[in-house]
Amino acid sequence: MSLLRVFRLALVAAIVLGAIVFTVKNPSQRVRLDLVFFPARDNVLLIEALFWALLGGAVVGLSFAGIKLLELQAQLQKERRGRHRLQSELTALRNLPLDDLDSEEEGR
């Protein structure tokens, strides 16, 4: 297992442990939730508000990551097509008869 994978696992475990501790320490904390585009709600559990905020952030983050992934895949396809075209050109140049090359050099 690579060091980066171990670090990621430790980071996720620390976040989950922190969330559990936060939930245990604030079991019935209630807040007023006043969002810009939605009506205000009173007596919302703090952990519920945090959960929905985390879920919303994850959805937005994954959306941006998905868009970037699609862009990178399109760029990769473009590069592969270009590489294939260059490979075909190189193969064609390698297969040229040597007589044609010699006659071209003599004409110079």
Image (spheres, rainbow, N blue to C red):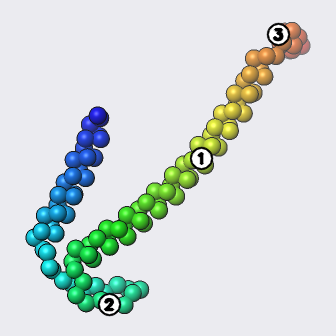
Distance of label 3 from label 1 (alpha carbons): 37 Å
Can you tell which of label 3 and label 1 is closer to the viewer?
1
The residue labelled by disc 3 is 98
Q: Residue at x 25, y 52 (%)?
A: 12
Residue 40 — which label?
Answer: 2
Of labels 3 and 2, earlier in sequence is 2
Horizontally, residue 49 falls left or right of residue 77, namely: left
Q: Residue at x 43, y 60 (%)?
A: 62
The residue labelled by disc 1 is 75
Q: In what quadrant of the picture does the N terminus appear?
A: top left
Horizontally, residue 39 falls left or right of residue 46, namely: right
| Spot occupied by residue 106 in the image (x, y as percentages of width and height) | 87, 9
Residue 33 — which label?
Answer: none
Q: Secondary structure at mark 2?
A: loop
**Callout 2 amino acid:** Ala
| Spot occupied by residue 16 in the image (x, y as percentages of width and height) | 21, 58
